[in-house]
Image (cartoon, helix red, strand yellow):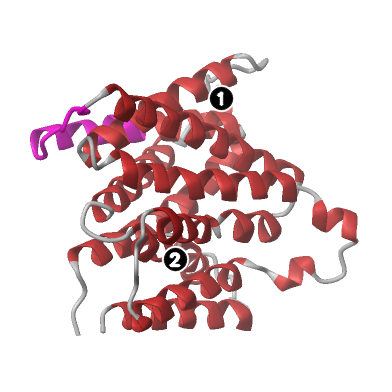
Amino acid sequence: MSLSIGILAGICAAVAWGVADFFAKSAVDKVGSLRTLFWVQSIGLLALLPALALFPLGLPSGGAVLGIALLIGIVNAASYFSFYRGFEKGKLSIVSPIAGSASAVTVILGIALLGERLSPVQGAGVLLALVGIPLVSINMREIRGRKLASLAAGVPEALFTMLGWGVMWFLVALAEEGAGWLFVILAMRFVTVTCAGLYSGMGKGGIALGKKGNGLWKVIAAAGILDAAGFAMLAYALTSEFASLVTPISHAYPAVTVALAFLFLREKPLRTQLLGIVAILLGVVALSA
């Protein structure tokens, strides 16, 4: 049993994103989603720059690739905005599993438009991961007993995010054929930071953290570095594996967040969440067969 470099990179992306979300939560609670988004994205962009000394940049081979890279950044920024807006309107237990299912969109696009074909065992592994992601994200304690209107809050934003990120990673796989993965990720982060800064700057509070941000810089820096690492590792994984194969594994990050909450916040996971974690782990085993 062995895991390819691409699948290992996808697993590392899931771990990085799961830990990043764990750190980012306290920042969002204190300074709001938009300020957190801007600074996490900005620090993440800076954290990626040293990679230029280790990997070739791979400039785009044509204007079409450059246009796709620009589109990727815009779609990523819009998806992030919608994601955080969904959190402001609705519950984490509703918004997160819907948005986290973006990998299903990437899988469909990869198979339908890129002609990607998986073996039966690989297909089973992907299916297990896709089933496990919503299971590990949904908190039935929060959902149970709520009115329909309350459950629907944030759902449109979550659906937009799901479609946005699903299409975005499909576009990343396309763009990497005409430019190196590092160029695509750096371009994406730069456009996202620019959009986040402009959007945050239009608000009353701007992007400054103010007094509420005192003591949060280490947390925000950790979240930014890990978030960027997750993007970079998935982008690298896409250079050697099908998007329909590695994207579901990388989007299993809620399992990491649940595990950290159990270890450090003493939050007891639900049976459905444990079942989701088991499904994801079985999916990884199937992919390594």
What number is the disc on residue 211?
A: 1
For marks 2 and 1, the one nearer the N-term is: 1
Q: Position of residue 12 (x, y in %)?
A: 30, 60
Residue appearing at x 31%, y 38% in the figure? 175
- Res. 189 in view: no
Question: In which quadrant will I find the N terminus?
Answer: bottom left
Say if the magenta span includes residue 60.
Answer: yes
Against 109, residue 191 (above or below) is: above
Relative to residue 115, is residue 270 depicted above or below? Answer: below
**Which residue range is magenta in the image?**
43-61
Residue at the image position 40 percent from the left and 42 percent from the top: 171
Residue 224 placement (x, y as % from top left): 38, 39
Tell me which residue sits at (75%, 72%) in the image.
141
The quadrant where residue 199 appears = top right
Kindly tell me whether residue 251 is visible in this rendering.
yes
Residue indicated by mark 2: 256
Q: Nearer the viewer, mark 2 or mark 1?
A: 2
